[in-house]
Amino acid sequence: MLLDPEESQLVLVDYQQRLMPSIHDAASVVANAVRLARIARLLSVPLWVTEENPAGLGATVAELQPHIAGRVLSKMAFDGSQILLPRLRPVAKAAQGGNARSLPKHLQKAAPAPQPTRESVVIAGCEAHVCLMQTALGLLEEDVEVWVVTDACSSRTERNRDAAFDRLAGAGAELVTTEMVAFEWLADAEHPQFKEVLALIK
């Protein structure tokens, strides 16, 4: 099974100003998160960003700020799935039914067609063994397909990061890399955005 950009959403978890200085390989992790955000924008993949206790841990790092306007969700729970799910799976508006005072059915506007669901969530973030893992596990419990971008995730220690990956894989998450996501979303060297995406990952 390969990723499809039309069925995907991207979630970036807690790349925050006061957290990242303590994170193993932080510069590389943030660089890959920026690549993911830019590729998602190029390919029209919806993006959501979480911030854990922003009063304590600060806002999202400056490198990501140009790519996340209006897409940031603040939280206090380590598991961000409950704040994300209403955005990842918005409830369709109910069509208004007719009644004695409404227009005849032949004059009523047709109900809008339901929007296709995007059941594949590509997720990355920090710390891998806390907020990233708990959020991913929460999404898996809701039958969401979860793809964890390993080279855009980290923790303060490699041991904690790797333990999170082991547990996530065992729970059914797919472990991928930034380049795997990019090329699966593109699918074809003749894609209109191929050169732009290639420039971001080289």
Image: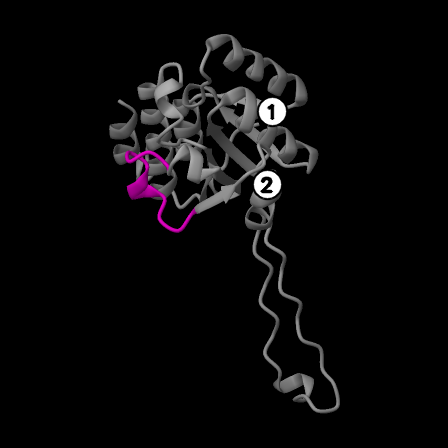
- The residue under label 1 is which amino acid type? Ala
- Asked whether 69 falls inside the magenta stretch, the response is yes
Which residue appears at 24% of the width and 29% of the height?
A: 199
Which residue appears at 63% of the width and 36% of the height?
A: 144
Q: CA distance from mark 1 to mark 2?
A: 13 Å
**Rendering quarter of residue 153:** top left
Q: Position of residue 20 (x, y in %)?
A: 37, 24
Above or below, comparing residue 84 to residue 29 in the picture: below
> Judging from the image, what secondary structure is the residue with disc 2 in?
loop
Q: Is residue 8 left or right of residue 98?
A: left
Of residues 169 and 161, the one nearer the viewer is 161
Crowding at label 1, few (<14), some or many (≥20) Cα neighbours within 10 Å? many
- The residue under label 2 is which amino acid type? Glu
Which residue appears at 35% of the width and 48% of the height?
A: 69
Residue found farthest to the bottom: 101
Residue range corresponding to the magenta coloring: 60-71
Of residues 57 and 125, the one nearer the viewer is 57
- Asked whether 194 falls inside the magenta stretch, the response is no
Q: From the image, tell me which residue sits under label 1.
A: 173
Cβ atoms at labels 1 and 2 below 8 Å apart: no
Q: Residue 119 shows which numbered tag?
A: 2
Q: Is residue 99 left or right of residue 67?
A: right
Q: Position of residue 145 (x, y in %)?
A: 61, 33
Q: Position of residue 178 (x, y in %)?
A: 40, 24
Q: Quadrant of the N terminus?
A: top right
Mark positioned earlier in the residue sequence (1 or 2) = 2
Q: Is residue 40 left or right of residue 159?
A: left
> Judging from the image, what secondary structure is the residue with disc 1 in?
loop
**Rendering quarter of residue 166:** top right
Magenta region, mostly helix, strand or loop? loop
Crowding at label 2, few (<14), some or many (≥20) Cα neighbours within 10 Å? some
Above or below, comparing residue 27 to residue 116 in the picture: above
